[in-house]
Amino acid sequence: MAKPAQMTASRPSAPAEGGWARFKKNFPLHKYYYLLMIPGLATLLVFRYAPMAGIVVAFKDYRIVDGIFGSQWVGLRWFEMLFSNAQFTRVLFNTIYISLLKLLVGFPAPILLSIFINEISSVRYKKAIQTAVYLPHFISWVVIGGILVTILSPSVGILSLFHVTKNPLLDPSNFRWLVVLSDIWKEAGWGTVVYLAAITNVNTDLYEAATVDGANRFQRIIHITLPAISGTIAVMLILRTGSLLSAGFDQMYVLQTPATMDVGDVLDTFVYRYGLAQGRFSYAAAAGLFQSVVGLILVGLSNYITTKMGQDSVW
C-alpha cells in the first residue's frame, strides 16, 4: 500500500488558470475596480495604440494629399537610405554615447540622493531639501538652457571670475559632460520619489537590530537599505535601458549649437530636422521606428537578464 505522502506527490497538478478565466472569476468581486480602469485604458488605447497605425508611413512614400493609406508603398527603401547615410551613423553614435553617460553617471544619482535624504534625522531639513531637489524638474529645458548660457558666459557669468574666455557650451570637448550634469541637476531630485517610497517600506526593526549588533550608518546602508530597494532599482534600470536611443529631445535641441552639432546631434533632433523642418515624413518615420524597435528589444533583453539574476522584473 502506498504511503499518503507518495500518493499526494503522484497526483497531477491542477492546470493553471488563464488570464481570461481569472478575469471572469474575479469580476463579480472586483467589478468596481475594473470600472475605474476604463478611463485609463481608453486613454491608453486612443493616444498610445491607435497612433501605431501611422507606423506604415515608414514603408510608404508618404504624401499629405494622398493620406497615410493612399500613399505609394516603397517597402524598405527609407531604411536602406537611412543606414547608408553617414550622418545617421554619426547621430547614432552620439545618441548611444550620451545615453550611456547618462546611464552610468546619472542613474545612480537619485539612488544616492534618496539615501542621503533618508539619513537626515530632522524632518524640517529633510522636507526643505526634498523641495529644493524636486523644483528643477518643473522648470522647462528652455529656461534651464537660458540659465546655463548665462552662468557659463565668459562675460557676465560665474566663469568671468576665473578669466575663462570661451563658453563651455560652445566647446565640443565639454558639451557632452555638461549635458549629463545638467540632466542630473534637473531630474535627479524627481527620481528620488520612487526610491524614497521604497526606502520607507523597509522594516525599521532591521535597522534597530543592526544598530544593536554594532553596525554603523554606512554598514546599515550597504547591508539593509540597498538590498531592500534592489528590486525597485532593477525595474527602474530596465525601463531606463529602453530609452538608450533617446538622449532627450528638449535638452539637446535647446543646448546644441552649430559649434557642437558634431557631438550633440542625436536621433531625436535628427528625426525632428528631417520630419518637420524638411518635410521628409517617411524618412523620419523610418528613423523613429528603428529607435522604437531597438528600445523594445533592449527592454525585453534587460528584463530577461534581470529575471535570471533573481531580481524583480517588469513582467
Image: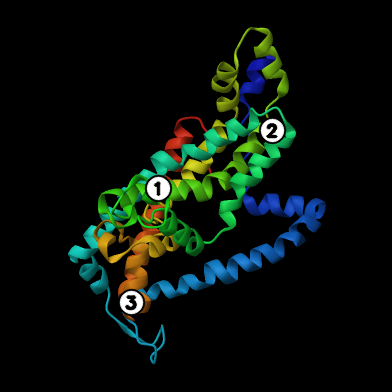
Q: Is residue 127 above or below residue 156?
A: above
Q: Is residue 141 left or right of residue 232?
A: left
**What color scheme is it?**
rainbow
Q: Quadrant of residue 277?
A: bottom left
List the residue tagged with mark 2.
200
Mark 2 or 3, closer to the camera: 2
Q: Position of residue 245 (x, y in %)?
A: 36, 55
| Residue 32 as seen in the image, left or right of residue 78 | right
**Mark 3 belongs to which amino acid?**
Ser
For marks 1 and 3 on the same chain, the one whose residue lies earlier in the sequence: 1
List the residue tagged with mark 3: 282
Task: Say which quarter of the image contains residue 222.
Answer: top right
Badge 3 element? helix
The Cα atoms of the two marked residues, 1 and 3, are separated by: 31 Å
Q: Is residue 33 visible?
A: yes
Whole-angstrom CA distance, mark 2 to mark 3, is 48 Å
Q: Position of residue 207 (x, y in %)?
A: 67, 18
The residue at 32%/52% (across/down) is 168
Disc 1 and disc 2: Cα gap in Å?
A: 29 Å
